[in-house]
Image (spheres, rainbow, N blue to C red):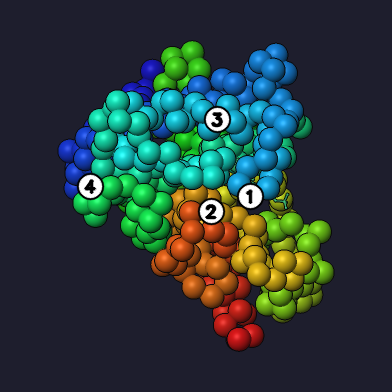
Amino acid sequence: MSHRISLTQYLIEQQRGPAQLPSQLRLLIEVVARACKTIAISVNKGALGDVLGTAGSENVQGEVQKKLDIIANEVLIEANEWGGHLAAMASEEMDDIHVVPNRYPQGEYLLLFDPLDGSSNIDVNVSIGTIFSVLKHSDGHAVSTSSFLQPGTAQVAAGYCVYGPQSTLVLTVGQGVVMFTLDREQGSWVLTQDKLQIPEDTKEFAINMSNMRHWAPPVKRYIDECLAGKEGVRGKDFNMRWVASMVADVHRILTRGGIFMYPWDQREPNKPGKLRLMYEANPMSFLVEQAGGASTNGLQRIMDMQPTQLHERVSVVLGSKNEVERVTAYHREAQ
Ligand code: AHG
Ligand code: MN
Ligand code: MN
């Protein structure tokens, strides 16, 4: 059997290599990966584990919570709060930050997560996932919500796990992007792809087309040009995919290229977009950029944005570099 590299081995190599990954950050990533393993097992049980359906509650964004949203959130909190590597956590499913209780030592990292991404796909057995972002808490003050309000460029690690036909963990610590696949028999994450690279060009786009009539003109222009195919200005036919789980759409883009958009639309003009900056857009942007892609809100690089709120939303355009630059140029021209 060829030599298999486990997540632990990869992280220890990162500790010894040029990245000099701090041991507390290594521990944090291992704990998150272990929690994702637990979530993967619950997801796989489905109806047999009584994890499908709604929980009968709403989160801070007024969205109905599914049982798995709450289960995944609890798994991540319980796994992470006692290890001494974190100061606090924030999640899509919690109104306020969760400070590590006094009975445990406080570490110097902040963890943000979307515990269960793609909730509308839980009950229909389509890929879902967990997204996470890690920041450093180093300002010397007691941890508070404002400690979290750092731009995406401050992230020290980010990743996601997709619970699909396979469970895969995709990670960056700022040294490129790597992918691990869960070996269920061994219970371990095994490195299955190193140095993921997004092709600069693509013929595949991902957007919820049912919102077309509400889009801003630059988005409409870009998609119209894709739809015009070979006969249009682009001179090539495009394909469309929309899983409605950002993890699955981004995973496809990291694997074979493409562009993903969840843009602002005119139904709620004061809402910048649907997706959340701190625990969806920022970690995905970090991964995409580390894989040679690009990520903007249509006008500016997402990772440069200064967050003002924990649950802030943002318009998202990410994926193959040349396509993202084209969409961004269309927005700038329209200004
Ligand atoms: P979540 O389940 O964490 O609320 O996120 C769902 C998001 C994202 O994963 C996906 O790309 C998008 O919502 C799908 O939205 P539509 O249902 O509007 O297509
Ligand atoms: Mn989500
Ligand atoms: Mn979610």
Tell which circle, 4 or 2, labels the residue nearer the N-terminal end: 4
Q: Disc 4 versus disc 2: distance between alpha carbons?
A: 30 Å
Secondary-structure class at tag 2: loop
Q: Quadrant of residue 29?
A: top left
Task: Say whether marks 1 and 2 touch (CB < 8 Å).
Answer: yes
Camera-side residue of 88 and 261: 88
Secondary-structure class at tag 3: helix
Q: For mark 4, what is the residue? A: 19
Q: Disc 3 versus disc 1: distance between alpha carbons?
A: 17 Å
Nearest-to-viewer mark from 3 and 1: 1
Query: In the image, what residue type sits under mark 4?
Result: Ala
Task: Say whether marks 3 and 1 touch (CB < 8 Å).
Answer: no
Q: For mark 3, what is the residue? A: 72
Task: Say whether marks 4 and 2 touch (CB < 8 Å).
Answer: no
Which quarter of the rendering shows the C terminus?
bottom right
Nearest-to-viewer mark from 1 and 4: 1
Image position of 329 with respect to 61: above or below? below
Q: For mark 2, what is the residue? A: 311
Tell which circle, 1 or 2, labels the residue nearer the N-terminal end: 1
Query: In the image, what residue type sits under mark 2?
Result: His
Can the viewer see residue 75? yes
Tell which circle, 3 or 4, labels the residue nearer the N-terminal end: 4
Mark 2 crowd level (few <14, some 14–19, many ≥20, 10 Å Cα): many
Nearest-to-viewer mark from 4 and 2: 2
